[in-house]
Image: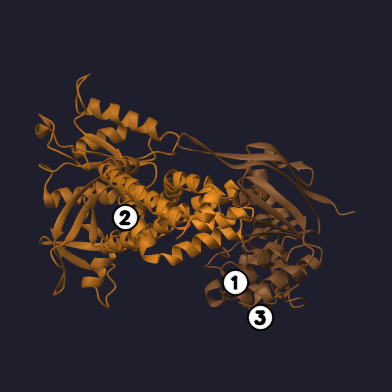
Amino acid sequence: MRINYEVFSVAFGSIRQNRLRAGLTILGVVVGIFSIIVIMTIITMLQNSIESGFSDLNKNTFQIQKWEAMRMGPHHHGDRNRKDITIEDFDRLQGMLTQALYIGAEQWSFGRVVKYGNKETNPNVQIAGMTIGALRNNNVKVEVGRDFIQTDIDFARNVCLIGMDVVDKIFTGVDPLGQQVIIDGLPITVVGVLERTPQLFGQSKDNYIVFPISSWQIIYGKTGRSVNITVMSHSKEDYNQVIDAAMGYMRTIRKVAPGEDNDFYIFSNESLISQVNDITSGIKIGALVVSIIALLAAGVGIMNIMLVSVTERTKEIGIRKAVGAKRADILIQFLFEAILLCIIGGVIGIALGVGLGNLVGKLINAQTAIPYNWIAIGISTCVFVGVLFGTYPAYKAANLDPIEALRHET
Amino acid sequence: MNENIINIEHISKVYTVGDVKVHALYDVSLRIDSTEYVAIMGPSGSGKSTLMNMLGCLDTPSGGKYDFKTRNVSLMTDNELAEIRNREIGFVFQTFNLLSRSNALHNVELPLIYAGVPSAERKERANQALISVGLGDRVHHKPNELSGGQRQRVAIARALVTNPAIILADEPTGNLDSKTGEEIMLLFHEINQKGNTIILVTHEEYIAQHAARVIRVRDGLVERDEAIVNRYIPGISKPESAVK
């Protein structure tokens, strides 16, 4: 058995000789590989983006909310009557959950206007009310000025931390520290400016202002709005333990009877990612089915074209056998040509898939991604299809009788 | 002194066509030694082609014994036959049988590729073989850029390149005009003079007369096996019958 330059050059030469035929034959492979790679590229881009910033939550942090973060389908029966999570619930949990590193409460109001002097923002600023723990868990960092202190929260002081987008909008050429902004009619003193955060899907996340949660509740009201609780564990090791403890305490606080479902929802970054995976798994399976069907059809086409090729080149096979080619030499030559056809199709499919996937990803501003593992799977599949459908024609070629083959007229 | 290369004892070949058994060869025995120049002659249907396939190790006999350099060919596997063809036999065909997409050099290289000779040495040997047949300036030409005589010279270079025990030429002048044919016969003469063993298969009496010995086959049997007294030596003794 001699796998050498001859095998490569003959296969390349044969494909180059029949460019149109080879091109049409590999179209199926291109489609098959393209469909799975483009989907996997987009999904990989989404996953990377989620991992890097879908939630600002720190590592080892989870959230407790009234509702699921992402919901598919309608609420379960009876869920609509869930009680809000109140600040009192939070206070009690904070007292009980001593094994947590930080525990925080936050509330959000969207679409607000912030005024300074005669300037004002668009009605799209997010106003957060947070405890000190929520600032830590959300990775909110003060760039200049000061952080909140506990007395800001305890005495519901009218102070705020201000995001860079708001600064850019209304504080051109003015140091915001110590200035008063007007939010919903109330004058609030700026005590700190927040660090810029990386964008997600092209959306800036700095168009917000943080109040002490107590001040927030005075402005926007205490009732009718549920508090989000965030908890950070000391380490990865005790993370699940803290989740279990928090769940137990919350059930006690909210008087959930044993055997009944939680009337609150706990989720982490990991659970968000697994939810995204659940949603995308259907798309993945669909793409996989399309790929498999296309590749099977392409494989039959390749087998057909290789059988034609064997017939056309019968004389050549005879000549090669006469001068000493063994069965294995001929077998490898034709098998390699089939595999090469598949690999060329696969490489084109991968290039198109990664290219178009990233183009689509760019439109939703996801980070560029190359799904290396799926590229490896794609190439292996191409080789497999080549072997599967190339073996019979190659076997036929290898077993031609040299005398008959030499006599063959083309 | 001359080493025995081919020793055939009572070989037969039977083909089964449908239910009918066809005897292509009944009972053939012959010996060919090194440096011989033998012509095998016979009309079509005589078993001449079958005998040639047998001698060229493209086929194995149904009965009898065929020793090639003391190795029993009758019992060889396909791969062993391929190896004998590769190392010991150089084929020259009536229709040249060159790879049309490859240039002269690559065509001549082909047996060396299957012999596993490294690339550099292969190119060097193929080049030398082409020079020896007078085609040193046509190395990179493809068959369709060469004349019939030049194509046959490429085929002869391909046959010579492995330095085989025998050159087996099947009607080598059949597709050439008489002048070119004569040039090819001169080339065979020179190759034989250098010590190569040549077996020439032909149905033309005139071509056969170039050899030193003629084996006449008819109806699957050796009719006559005789030395040629008045050989045609191309360029030296030009027979009148050659002028057509």
Q: Please give the letter of the chain rendered in orange.
A: A
Work out which quarter of the rendered image holds the C terminus of chain B and state it: bottom right
Task: List x then y, in percent, for residue A158.
Answer: 20, 57
Could you tell me which chain the residue with mark 2 belongs to?
A
Kind of residue at badge 3: Asp
The residues tagged by marks 1 and 3 sit, at their Cα atoms, a distance apart of: 13 Å
Label 3 element class: loop
Identify the residue at image location x=47%, y=62%.
Answer: A14
Residue picked out by circle 3: B137
Residue bearing mark 1? B151
Q: Position of residue A257 (x, y in %)?
A: 19, 20
Q: Residue furthest bottom?
A: B137
In the picture as drawn, the residue positioned furthest to the front comes out as B240
Circle 2 sits on which residue?
A: A31
Please state which of residues B202 and A223 is positioned toward the viewer in this rendering: B202
- Please determine whether, in this image, residue B82 is positioned above or below residue A178: above
Foreground residue among B6 and A54: B6
